[in-house]
Amino acid sequence: EIFSIIQTVDEGYAVCGYTGAKDWGEVDCWVIKLDENVNTVWDNIFGGIGWDETNTILQTEDGGYVVFGFVQSKNEGREDAWIAKLDENGEIVWDKAFGGSQNDEVFSGIKTADGGYAVCGYTESKGAGGYDAWIAKLDENGEMAWDKAFGGIEAEVANSIIQTGDGGYALAGYTWSKGAGREDVWVIKLNENGEVVWDKTFGGSDEDVARCIIQAEDGGYVLAGYTESKGAGRYDAWVIKLDEEGNVE
């Protein structure tokens, strides 16, 4: 299964996800380089005996790559967040796993203006209870500078992260602990140190989830995801435009 694709500087493509079709474990991280005609240049697999998955890939200035995801096959806990730096041939230069004794997963990662990285997902190892939305700031070598967890006694997940024009961050995902019912879209604006500036929830009595966020040219935000609380059927695509303070326009 593939979760992320980018176009590379040589006009080809790189994708990442996981495979259960070969190699060592239950499923393994899978990275594939394709040429401009979508022919495979190389494909590399990383993992151990557990469930290991990549879900975001970026190309770095040296022609290599960075992948983000989570692994069961190393470190302290059940599922741990994972970042790996790859060279131009997809071989690991370095990798880091971080987390606690419970599940800690990364769903999205970005390169930050200072040359480091920021990732988001959820943590079960820290926070208020259940799953908590999680952001971690990493330096250029994948070492953690800081991390923050947000949530209540129920489940909260951050599916998407961006760095905002003011040097802070915005997260989008869902919350069970606040809002109108079940999962509600949750947007959190953070400053450059990961402190909350504001947060907003949107939704009705059913399942409403944000999958991705971008910052618009006017300084506001656009969310995309799905809603079960409105629309024509069970699950409907949902796009929300917000101003720079998180209010629906």
Image (tube, rainbow, N blue to C red):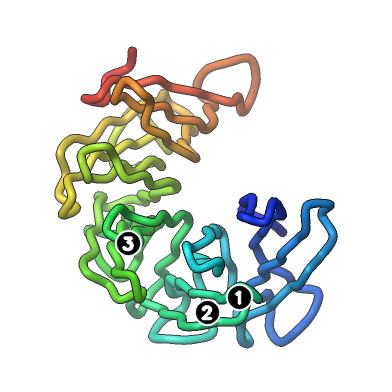
Residue for badge 3: 115
Give SS at disc 1.
Answer: loop
Q: How many marks?
A: 3
Q: Residue at x 54, y 27 (%)?
A: 228
Up the image or down, 3 lies above or below 221; here it is below
Q: CA distance from mark 2 to mark 1?
A: 5 Å
How dense is the environment of label 2, judged by Cα within 10 Å: few (below 14), some, or many (20 and up)? many
> Where's residue 21, x and y in %?
81, 74
Disc 2, disc 1: CB below 8 Å? yes
Up the image or down, 130 lies above or below 94; here it is above
Q: For residue 51, which numbered disc appears in the image?
A: 1
Q: Is residue 79 left or right of residue 115?
A: right
Q: For residue 72, which numbered disc appears in the image?
A: 2
Q: Amino acid at mark 3?
A: Gly
Q: Residue at x 49, y 74 (%)?
A: 85
> Where's residue 130, x and y in %?
34, 59
Q: Residue at x 54, y 84 (%)?
A: 73
The answer, for residue 17, to whether it is visible in the render is yes
How dense is the environment of label 1, judged by Cα within 10 Å: few (below 14), some, or many (20 and up)? many
The answer, for residue 182, to whether it is visible in the render is no
Q: CA distance from mark 3 to mark 1?
A: 30 Å
Which of the image's four quarters has the C terminus? top left
Q: Amino acid at mark 1?
A: Trp
> Where's residue 9, x and y in %?
61, 55
Q: Amino acid at mark 2?
A: Gln
Which of the image's four quarters has the N terminus? bottom right
Q: Is residue 211 left or right of residue 2?
A: left
The residue closer to the viewer here, 27 or 243, is 243
